Image (tube, rainbow, N blue to C red):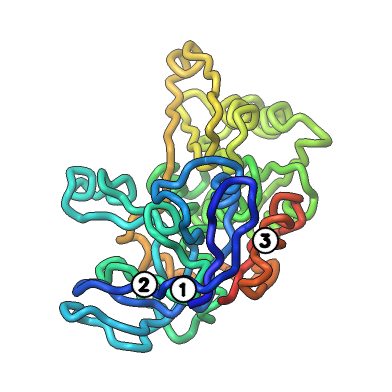
């Protein structure tokens, strides 16, 4: 099969022939229809190690159709349309049994622990697949696997956004703009913060009540002024920059919460007395529980969550390296999708 293979940091992915995965009795082979290009993969290209030692195929935001089934697979047939969750779970560990399968003790991240979907085919345990209705375009729906599911978990389960909550979202990239969309869908009044007007325009279209360009004005002062010094009920940091995390924490009201969605390998200094005295919660948020995918897909099918405005471009797999360059240069508003 054709695949874009990661060999070492600082080098472009190589488009080459790669062995088609062999499936086990409980696996399926998925013919990849599309895979979203996520900033997480840039971290691997810049040196963050993958769990699977290179060579490894990156890509964790995929949809496709079933091409082959293992002998013990039930409930699926060839040709079924599927979405592949970005984080797979064992279903047996303590966290899984507590309903926290997105932080499974034996979690398997697609395109990290195992080969991902920047390829024509991918092997996935059948138990983890999510069915995609015929009404949804298979290529476009691929971004639900991470760019929309990760914000869904962050908003619903970690931020616990309720109708009427004041919500701040720092960073309106491929994930952050959907934190905006889903927080608004949950009834939140959303203040969206970014340094690019184009991203803020998209955030406004997806439900932001107020947009703030932090390259032109201080977002902390602005939000505190807008909330009459009260602060927001929930803030989300969705870009992974320690300085921005501090801003997101600074706008939380007494007794409110902050959710860290963005990844960073840098330390973040937090004033402990502020957290203690104001009884502020700081929560991490990783991926999405598999049980939450079906209702999210239904929300997309019903038009309650939009995907079309999020599509920046469709590119052939051969242009994956250019897609990464554009993403890093800030040229991508929404999501680029590669089509093997």
Q: What element carries label 1?
A: strand
Q: Nearer the viewer, mark 1 or mark 2?
A: 2
- Between 308 and 25, which is closer to the camera in this rendering? 25
| Tags 3 and 2 touching, CB below 8 Å | no
How far apart are the two marked residues, 3 and 2, measured between alpha carbons? 23 Å
Quadrant where the C terminus sits is bottom right
Q: Along the polypeptide, which appears first: circle 3 or circle 1? A: 1
Label at residue 129: none
Q: How crowded is mark 3: few (under 14 residues within 10 Å), some or many (20 or more)?
A: some
Q: Is residue 235 above or below residue 325?
A: above
**Place of residue 205 in the rendered image (x, y in percent of width and height, measured from the top left):** 69, 61
Q: Along the polypeptide, which appears first: circle 1 or circle 2? A: 2
How far apart are the two marked residues, 3 and 1, measured between alpha carbons? 20 Å
Question: What residue would you read off at disc 1?
Answer: 63
**Place of residue 301 in the rendered image (x, y in percent of width and height, measured from the top left):** 48, 76
Q: Is mark 2 on a helix, strand or loop?
A: loop
Res. 162 in view: no
Q: Along the polypeptide, which appears first: circle 3 or circle 2? A: 2
Q: Is residue 305 above or below residue 32?
A: above
Question: What residue would you read off at disc 2?
Answer: 21
Q: Which of marks 3 and 1 is in front?
A: 3
**Place of residue 209 in the rendered image (x, y in percent of width and height, measured from the top left):** 67, 50
**Place of residue 7 in the rendered image (x, y in percent of width and height, measured from the top left):** 53, 54
163 lies left or right of 223: left
Question: What residue would you read off at disc 3?
Answer: 321
Question: Which residue lies most toward the top here?
Answer: 273
Res. 57 in view: yes
């Amino acid at each position: 099969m054709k695949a874009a293979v990661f060999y070492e940091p600082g080098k472009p992915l190589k488009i080459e022939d790669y062995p088609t995965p062999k499936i086990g009795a409980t696996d399926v082979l998925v013919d990849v229809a599309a895979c979203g290009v996520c900033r997480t993969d840039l971290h691997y290209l810049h040196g963050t190690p993958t769990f699977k030692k290179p060579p490894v195929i990156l890509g964790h935001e995929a949809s496709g159709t079933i091409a082959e089934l293992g002998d013990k697979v039930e409930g699926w047939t060839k040709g079924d349309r599927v979405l592949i969750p970005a984080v797979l779970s064992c279903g047996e560990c303590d966290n899984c049994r507590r309903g926290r399968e997105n932080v499974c003790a034996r979690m398997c991240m697609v395109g990290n622990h195992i080969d991902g979907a920047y390829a024509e085919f991918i092997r996935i345990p059948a138990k983890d697949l999510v069915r995609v209705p015929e009404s949804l375009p298979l290529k476009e729906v691929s971004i639900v696997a991470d760019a929309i599911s990760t914000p869904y978990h962050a908003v619903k389960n970690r931020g616990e956004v309720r109708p009427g909550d004041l919500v701040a979202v720092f960073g309106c990239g491929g994930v952050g703009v959907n934190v905006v969309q889903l927080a608004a869908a949950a009834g939140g009044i959303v203040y969206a913060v970014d340094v690019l007007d184009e991203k803020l325009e998209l955030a406004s279209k997806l439900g932001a009540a107020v947009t703030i360009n932090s390259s032109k004005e201080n977002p902390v002062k602005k939000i505190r002024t807008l909330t009459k010094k009260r602060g927001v009920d929930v803030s989300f940091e969705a870009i992974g920059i320690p300085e921005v995390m501090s801003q997101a924490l600074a706008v939380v009201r007494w007794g409110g919460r902050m959710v860290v969605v963005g990844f960073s390998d840098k330390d973040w200094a937090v004033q402990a007395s502020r957290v203690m005295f104001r009884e502020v919660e700081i929560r991490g948020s990783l991926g999405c529980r598999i049980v939450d995918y079906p209702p999210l897909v239904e929300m997309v099918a019903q038009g309650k969550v939009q995907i079309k405005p999020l599509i920046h471009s469709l590119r052939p797999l051969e242009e994956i390296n250019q897609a990464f360059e554009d993403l890093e240069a800030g040229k991508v508003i929404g999501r680029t999708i590669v089509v093997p």
